[in-house]
Image: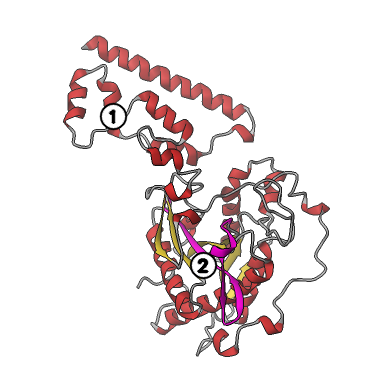
Amino acid sequence: MAALIQRQFAILSFITAFLFVMTGVFSLGGNKLMIASSTVQQAAARVSSLAILGWMGQEIPALGEIVQASPERRTNSVSGFLFQLATSIQPGDLRSLLGRELPGMVTADDARFVVAGKGATLADFYIEYPPHPKQVIDASDAVPLTSEPVPAAQDKPDKEQTEPVAKPDTAGRKIVYVYNTHNRESWYSETKPVGTSVDHPTRNISLVGKHLAEALNERGIGAEASKDDIYQELLNQNKDYALSYAQSLQVVKAAVENNRELRYFFDLHRDTAPRDRTTVTIKGKTYARVMFVIGKRNKNYEKNEAFATELHQLMEEMYPELSRGVMEKGAKTDHGEYNQSISPGSLLMEIGGTENTLQECLNTAEALADVFAAYYLKAEKVDKPASDAPAKR
């Protein structure tokens, strides 16, 4: 028995030393080779205590008997774990093999609709494509906009639809912060696609964020929009695109430091789903549909989820079918947290897709401002302090 324990200890010591050496190698290799802490955390989360006992039980019979007696025992091998870690494919689960290529096969552990809008399906599962270097050029080389794109007067909704019965008032305080983690996401109508990426340095989703902030201010909701070019900042610091959320989190934290009144944080994106799923016509006007995305790696994600669900329900009343629903994404998919731990009022919103137009997305920004103004007005009516986080209902 003593010899077996010594052998097991030697194996574990070797693995520890190997990991220590590899960490040093990656650290010396530059930012592009560094492993994010979230990746390490995700990998560690896949290792259960029973799996560790099972591996040790192969050398120590007593431990093997304990694992075999457990009703939760899984037949995990070291090679199987390493294979899953490297490929994200779980041995014995065909869905994990097909899930990335066939969105309909995404497992419930990866993503699910908390509240599904009309026509919602996991085939709409959002995949984040990085910009192509040949398409997204340095913003300094781009031709500046000669005018700000704003909806034409005749395109605005009727007065009775845009103005709540009583106008909300944040007393001059800025409580909403709008930003874009993937700020160069654009549309076919504004740029030419290169591979799977549809991006542009100036004609992009950041224009929608700016317009949303302006529309909120018009409705009595103090809001500000970020002017940060996240993609350019990553380039300047020689960081990988996968670190976009870490970069935008720094932007959000800086905004909070400058204004402690901020309570709501909206990260606007552009989806890749086809036009027939991302477009709706309401009273003769065309809008890009909205999908709310919640990351479960935020331990308090239920509050963000409740907030998104309430906005979805209110949107269904005011703009039927504009919402595609509320999607919940687990730790195994993309970033999985989306900076939503910053506040229970943090949301990631997919507005339209590559086949929508900028004008349709601007129309949606107006509608979204109406919905949030109505939400905030309801919160005031139930005597909720304006400085508090979103109300739970």
Answer yes or no: is residue 147 visible. Answer: yes
In this rendering, would 258 be left or right of 326?
A: right
Residue found 58% across the figure and 29% down from its top: 27
Residue 323: percent from left, percent from top: 49, 69
Q: Please tell me the numbered disc located at residue 140.
A: none
- Residue 29 drawn above or below residue 42: above
Which of marks 1 and 2 precedes in the sequence? 1
Residue 345: percent from left, percent from top: 47, 65
Instruction: Reply yes or no: does residue 219 show up in magenta.
Output: no
In this rendering, would 98 be left or right of 211?
A: left
Q: Type of residue at label 1?
A: Thr
Residue 140: percent from left, percent from top: 81, 53
Q: Please tell me the numbered disc located at residue 75.
A: 1
Question: Label 2: which residue?
Answer: 264
Instruction: Reply yes or no: does residue 295 show up in magenta.
Output: yes
The reply to whether discs 2 and 1 touch (Cβ–Cβ < 8 Å) is: no
What range is drawn magenta here? 272-297
Indicate the quadrant containing the N terminus: top left, top right, bottom left or bottom right.
top left
Residue found 68% across the figure and 66% down from its top: 207
Q: Type of residue at label 2?
A: Tyr
- For disc 2, the neighbor class at 10 Å (few under 14, some 14 to 19, many from 20) is some
- Residue 84 drawn above or below residue 138: above
Q: Nearer the viewer, mark 2 or mark 1?
A: 1
Based on the displayed image, in which of its 4 quarters is residue 96 positioned?
top left
- SS state under label 1: loop
